Amino acid sequence: MNIREIEQCIKSMTKETRFNHSKGVQKTAGDLARHYGLDVEKAELAGLMHDCVKNLTVEEMLKLCDELGCELDFVTRREYKLIHAPLGAYYSKKIFAVDDEEIFNSIYWHTTAKANMTLFEKIIYVADVIEPNRKYDIVDELRRLAYEDIDVAMLKILNYTINKQLAAGKMLHSETINARNYLIAKGVNV
């Protein structure tokens, strides 16, 4: 599938607000890729596809996981809002026929993050959080940090996410903790 066909498919699969978010991530990922000297078109494609299955029901996502061979860990299966990330990676590869490891991994990890992410993976993770439709208390600071030091932006996002999850009584994914610990061990601080 080409990018126009993928875009039309995503538009038909998602609610208008989700599609607008995906378009915002597409643009932001492209801008960040340009800023950091990476492949802009590739980042835009990953940004567009990152939430492609998010509007499916939990039952539909679980069924699709089985069909596409997407195995879910304990926390992802319990915190169902995480399912769309690994499933979206498989969907992009098997249904949209986008066979690119960087795109696959960036979609797979765009919600939980993980230790030792590539710059491309960080761009998609950060773009998802700072795209223009996002409105929350620290988003403007995160937008600035994303272009100054993406690792600092990552750590600030991870801290924010972890605190939000804890306040809501939700489980934390081990890879989110690993991502935070990795950045701190690397000397990143906020």
Image: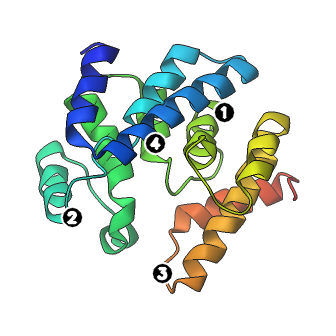
Q: Residue at x 21, y 54 (%)?
A: 56
2 and 1 marks in contact (CB < 8 Å): no
Q: Amino acid at mark 3?
A: Lys
Please rate how many residues cluster around mark 1, counting C-alpha atoms within 10 Å: few if below 14, some from 14 to 19, many from 20.
some
| In front: label 1 or label 3 | 3
Q: Amino acid at mark 1?
A: Leu
Q: Which residue is mark 1?
A: 119
Q: Quadrant of residue 52?
A: top left
Label at residue 21: 4
Q: Nearer the viewer, residue 149 or 188?
A: 149
Q: Which residue is mark 3?
A: 170
3 and 2 marks in contact (CB < 8 Å): no
4 and 1 marks in contact (CB < 8 Å): no
| In front: label 4 or label 3 | 4
| In front: label 2 or label 4 | 4
Choose the circle earlier in sequence order: 4 or 3: 4
Q: Is residue 102 above or below residue 113?
A: above
Q: Amino acid at mark 4?
A: His
Q: Which residue is mark 2?
A: 58
Please rate how many residues cluster around mark 3, counting C-alpha atoms within 10 Å: few if below 14, some from 14 to 19, many from 20.
few
